[in-house]
Image: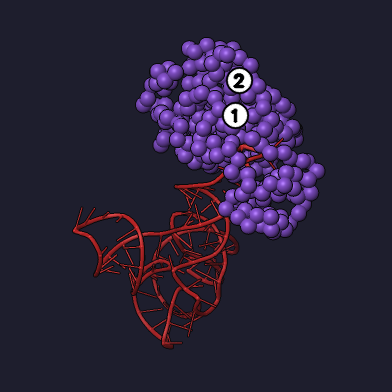
Amino acid sequence: MIVGPTASGKSAFAVEIAERLGAGIVSLDSMQVYRGMDIGTAKATPGDQLRVPHSMIDLVDPGEEYSVQDFQIEARRIIDSSETPWVLVGGSGLHMRAVIDPLEFLPTDETLRFELEETEPSVLVAELLAADTEAGARVDLANPRRVIRAVEVYRLTGRTPSEIVDDPPRRAVAAYESRYPCRIVGIDPGEALAERIDRRLDAMISTGLLAEVANLRGSLGRTASQAVGYAQLTPVVTGEATMDHGLGATRKATWALARRQRAWFRRDPRITWLDPVNDDVVAAVMEMT
RNA sequence: GGAGGGUUGGCUGAGCGGUCGAAGGCAACGGUCUGAAAAACCGUCAAAGGCGUUGGGCGCGUCUUUCGUGGGUCCGAAUCCCACACCCUCCG
């Protein structure tokens, strides 16, 4: 499995490694599941897909929602369907853990969710604390989304945040125990990442990112419309923002994303970090397997 | 040449006599993470110098200086006055 920040070059390594292993690739990316979002999400090219079969891309239309749990179920189904080795690559931390670690998502309910979203967060916080005085230690009470989810789970299952943490699977997740035998390699070019991000954005533009964004305009759903590049370049396409502004905003957003990805993976003790410039990534990975 | 506006921390931008080393935003940095995650959220964040702490450094504590520059008013100035420098707008 290969993880790392965006623009680290991990996908190219994945293709090469998978080819040598006779493996298939499973993308661990929250945005590549959307059809039509190809250039901006740096999706594997048709050429790459011809070399190695890719899974977990182009699953739904961008107007739809694809939850982490949907992702978990489908990815595991694919992995379990064949004995052949798999190379998992991507930069979505939660998705990665949902697939390989024993994450068990508790139930959700659309109607209830809608109701909670309309409720004043402080009311929900009060409800949570009334049921569980220690809730603040488990849930970020300043974060509306987390609070909503915690209340949703509580109302649906009667279980409080403090009760849930003690579940054995939760403990396993906290201990970074995966349910699949796997080696995890992190790719990070360090200082060079910022420049790689710039170069890749230029390349995306010259291969038609703007046209792609224009084409998808209006058809992006709640999640897809937040994707880096699409969110910042849509105003450019509609004439509401200048090209310079859009590109600058995209660069910033990409960098911010990379920072969050690094923060996520940094604390995973299972990851062996490699530098794509100075290390022979392919050889190192082949040796591990 | 004349009239007016401006010069604040890495950037932007409030403050217009005391509670201001200075709001807010951005950037930066650190962190959180179980059904929206490329999401959402939290924290830190000016510089220079003196003294103390230390074997030394980091850090920490403490004091001083710094809001274009120099002077002045005032118990007290980023805030008021004067001069100078630079920038912008308008009129010639």
Residue A215 in the image: state x and y as whole percent: 71, 29
Q: Circle 2 sits on which residue?
A: A79
Q: Give the amino acid at mark 1.
A: Val
User: Which chain's residue wears label 1?
Assistant: A
Q: Is residue A133 above or below residue A84?
A: below
| Chain letter for the part of the structure drawn in red | B
Which tag, 2 or 1, sits closer to the chain's start? 2
Q: How many discs appear?
A: 2
| Chain letter for the part of the structure drawn in purple | A
> Is the residue under label 1 in contact with that under label 2 (CB below 8 Å)?
yes
Whether residue A152 is visible here, answered yes or no, is no
Dot 1 lies on which element?
Answer: helix
Residue at point 55%, 18% (across, down): A86
Residue at point 67%, 27% (across, down): A73
Residue A31 in the image: state x and y as whole percent: 63, 31
Query: Pointer 1: residues within 10 angstroms few (<14), some, or many (20+)?
Result: many
In the picture provided, is A279 more to the left or to the right than B80? left
Quadrant of the frame with the C terminus of chain A: top left
Residue at point 75%, 50% (across, down): A116
Q: Give the amino acid at mark 2.
A: Ile
Which one is in front, A86 or A59? A86
User: Splitting the image into 4 quarters, where does residue A248 fall?
Assistant: top right
Which one is in front, A271 or A127? A127
Q: Circle 1 sits on which residue?
A: A99
Separation of disc 2 and disc 1 at Cα?
A: 9 Å
